[in-house]
Structures are given as structure tokens and as C-alpha cells.
């Protein structure tokens, strides 16, 4: 059996699935981040990105602001984070305590075949702390993620966990259609988001507003 | 009979714009600053019924706005036109692909009435790029009250399940 230097994404995902808080909303970035999570733990409360690289964290920030009573867990890649590092500063400024970010650090652009990052060795947890996210740590084992998830119910700010992993270059085939409109509608129905009530000739409003 | 200032619907256009957002149930605004939008953003920040999220980049702001709307809160995006030029990928692969209804209030810098000359190249590119992105948009009409124009833009976004940009002039947003 081949022994890898780091755990795989699947190892961390299994630890996450076993410790996922009740009511959790999960946002996964493009590629295997979404495909593998759909294979391991498909739920209406998952929002899967199929593209829009680098935008999973800011979308998760918005979701955490809109749903302050529910834990929001975002899975982002190191390459994607480098595309929109400013989002860390924005998240540090808002600092919602219900937002947990899991940063897969595999050192490559896995979804495009494994090209090296501009800076694969960057200390992303230190970068997050410098951006105002005090609760930022590097983790090397799935057990450590499990312990963090179990302990994260009451916090004073967002949490940023950098997970050292092997690159997962092989594309996982998701068991369900990740149709974007279906993903959005299913998600919004699951959380009871108010519907838009059209009014003939304009002037519609969101339900209850 | 001569109407007093208080009776005219366009007595103070920026106030009417903010009042319309409140009346329509907008509870969040995501923004990247712009000289024209600056005072409106200050007023929004002081408004207890609304939350202002300040972003570092317009594409990031777009994603935050999508996330807030996904969470069930009506959201407006306030940015300069240059910011829309730089958010193209997120516009097509997130906001449009997932059909997020988003009201965008976009300052139209570099239009002929903008005295700041270095905005001209952005003004010239604005509407062709918006059209190229498939971003539904219109310019505000300075001869009509701004409130109904904001409401029409918001309704278009919801009915069309898409972002809609209302290109606003300086008098629409400056106190």
C-alpha cells in the first residue's frame, strides 16, 4: 500500500461528514471539492460551485451574514484563494462567528491538471490571521479537523483551518447532477428562504417583507 | 399651484433612492467605494434596517451579494462602472449561471456629464461590455423620479432571475 505524505481530501471529508454540525450549510468550490462532497454527503443544504474560481469564500461570507443562526462551512482550494486574497480581508472585517473555512492546501492547481501554484509554501493560516481572522490554524490530520468541528459551536469570530493534503488530480464523478439552478432552488427551499411574490405589472416583494 | 420641495417626488433624488430600497425590503448592500456613491454608502451604513458589507474588489462583492441573496435576504450591489468591467467572470459563471436576482446600482463614470476626464475610457466601454456580458441594464432618466426607476430595476432582476444594472448619474446619488 502506498503511504502518502499527507492525508487525502477524502480523509478530511470523512472527518467533516462525521462531525458536521446540525443545521450546517456547506459551500464547496469547483472540481473535486464539490464532486467528492456530493459523493460522500449529498444534501439539499449543500451549495456546489461548478466554476467561478475564487468566489466560494465571498459567497459563503454573504450566506453567513444572511443566515447568522446556522453554521456555514466553506471548502476552498489554495489556488482559488490566491485568485481572490482580498476576500480574506473582507471576511476578517465582518468576522461572522458562524463561518468556518476549510482551506485545502495541496500546493497545486489540481482541477487543471496539477500545475504548481505561484507560491505553494505560503503560510495561509498566517495570511488569514494578518487579515483579521484570529482563529486560523494549520492542521495536518483529519482527526484534528474532527476535534475542531466538535469544539466550534460557540466562537467569537470566523474560523480558518488550513488542511494539508495530497493533490487529488483524478476527477471524481459526482453521483448527482450538479445543475446550478437546481442546486440554488433546492438550497433555498431547504433553508426556507422567502420566495419572491410577483405582482402583475411590477412591484413584487419577497415573502413577508 | 406651485408645489413645495417636499411635495415633489424628485425633491431629493438620493434620499428617494435610499427610501425606495428600504420600502422594497432591501436589508443588505454590498459595495466597493466610488466618489459619487460615497455619501450614499455612508447613509446606508447609518441605516439601522440595512447592513453594508464593504468588499475589496467588485467580483468579490458580486459573490458576497449572491451569497446574501442565497440566504434569503434582498440585496443590492453598489459599484462603479469600472468595477463591472472587472467582474466579468463572476458575472457570467456565478450570478448569471445560477440566475441570482441582483439589483445593481452602478455609477456611470465617464459619461458625457462626468467632468472627470480620466473616466472617459471606462464610460466609452461600459455599455458595449455590459451588452457583451449579457448584463441587462438601463440608464437612469434624469427627468423622471428616481424611486420608480430603482423599483423597476429591482423588479426586472427578480422577474428575470438575473442581475440588472441601473446606471446612475451624479445627481441620483450625491447629497
Image (spheres, rainbow, N blue to C red):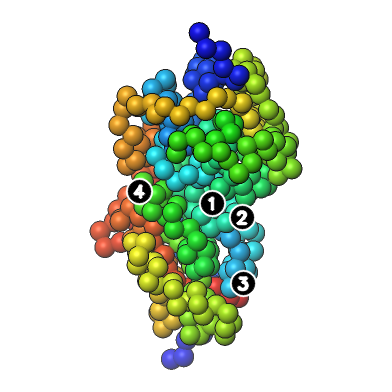
Same chain shared by disc 2 and disc 4: yes
Which residue carries the number 4 mark?
A: B97
**Residue A169 location, x and y as percent?**
45, 29
Query: Which numbered disc, 1 or 3, marks the residue closer to the eye?
Result: 1
For the residues bearing labels 1 and 2, Cβ distance under 8 angstroms: yes
For the residues bearing labels 3 and 4, Cβ distance under 8 angstroms: no
Q: Check disc 2: other Cα within 10 Å, few if <14, some if 14-19, many if 20+.
A: some
Q: Earlier in the sequence, mark 3 or mark 2?
A: 3
Q: CA distance from mark 2 to mark 4?
A: 23 Å
Q: Residue at x 50, y 41 (%)?
A: A56
Which residue carries the number 1 mark?
A: B60
Front residue of A82 and B146: A82
Q: Check disc 4: other Cα within 10 Å, few if <14, some if 14-19, many if 20+.
A: some
Same chain shared by disc 1 and disc 2: yes
State the SS at label 1.
helix
Which residue carries the number 2 mark?
A: B56
Q: Is residue A84 above or below residue A111?
A: below
Output the chain of dot 3. B
Q: Check disc 1: other Cα within 10 Å, few if <14, some if 14-19, many if 20+.
A: many
Same chain shared by disc 1 and disc 3: yes
State the SS at label 2.
loop
Which residue carries the number 3 mark?
A: B35
**Residue B8 location, x and y as percent?**
47, 80
Amino acid at each position: 500500500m502506498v503511504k502518502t505524505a499527507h492525508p487525502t481530501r477524502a480523509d478530511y471529508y470523512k472527518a467533516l461528514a462525521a462531525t458536521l454540525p446540525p443545521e450546517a450549510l456547506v459551500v464547496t468550490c469547483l472540481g473535486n471539492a464539490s464532486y467528492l462532497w456530493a459523493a460522500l454527503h449529498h444534501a439539499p443544504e449543500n451549495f456546489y460551485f461548478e466554476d467561478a474560481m475564487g468566489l466560494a469564500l465571498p459567497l459563503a461570507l454573504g450566506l453567513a451574514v444572511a443566515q447568522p443562526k446556522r453554521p456555514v462551512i466553506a471548502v476552498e482550494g489554495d489556488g482559488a484563494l490566491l485568485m481572490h486574497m482580498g476576500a480574506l480581508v473582507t471576511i476578517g472585517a465582518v468576522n461572522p462567528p458562524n463561518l468556518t473555512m476549510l482551506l485545502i492546501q495541496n500546493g497545486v492547481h489540481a482541477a487543471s491538471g496539477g500545475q504548481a501554484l505561484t507560491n505553494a509554501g505560503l503560510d495561509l493560516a498566517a495570511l488569514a490571521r494578518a487579515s483579521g481572522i484570529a482563529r486560523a490554524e494549520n492542521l495536518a490530520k483529519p482527526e484534528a479537523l474532527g476535534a475542531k468541528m466538535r469544539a466550534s459551536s460557540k466562537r467569537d469570530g470566523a474560523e480558518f483551518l488550513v488542511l494539508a493534503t495530497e493533490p487529488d488530480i483524478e476527477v471524481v464523478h459526482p453521483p448527482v447532477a450538479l445543475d446550478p439552478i437546481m442546486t440554488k432552488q433546492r438550497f433555498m427551499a431547504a433553508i426556507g428562504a422567502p420566495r419572491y411574490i410577483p405582482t402583475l405589472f411590477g412591484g413584487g416583494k419577497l415573502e413577508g417583507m | 399651484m406651485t408645489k413645495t420641495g417636499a411635495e415633489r417626488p424628485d425633491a431629493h433624488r438620493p434620499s428617494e433612492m435610499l427610501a425606495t430600497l428600504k420600502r422594497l425590503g432591501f436589508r443588505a448592500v454590498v459595495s466597493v467605494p466610488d466618489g459619487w456613491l460615497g455619501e450614499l454608502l455612508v447613509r446606508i451604513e447609518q441605516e439601522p434596517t440595512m447592513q453594508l458589507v464593504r468588499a475589496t474588489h467588485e467580483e468579490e462583492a458580486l459573490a458576497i451579494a449572491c451569497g446574501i441573496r442565497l440566504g434569503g435576504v434582498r440585496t443590492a450591489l453598489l459599484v462603479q462602472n469600472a468595477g463591472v468591467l472587472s467582474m466579468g467572470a463572476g458575472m457570467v459563471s456565478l450570478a448569471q449561471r445560477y440566475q441570482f436576482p441582483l439589483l445593481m446600482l452602478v455609477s456611470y463614470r465617464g459619461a458625457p456629464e462626468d467632468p472627470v476626464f480620466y473616466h472617459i475610457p471606462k464610460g466609452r466601454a461600459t455599455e458595449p461590455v455590459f451588452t457583451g456580458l449579457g448584463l441587462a441594464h438601463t440608464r437612469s432618466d434624469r427627468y423622471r423620479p428616481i424611486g420608480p426607476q430603482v423599483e423597476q430595476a429591482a423588479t426586472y432582476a427578480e422577474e428575470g432571475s438575473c442581475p440588472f444594472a441601473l446606471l446612475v448619474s451624479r445627481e441620483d446619488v450625491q447629497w
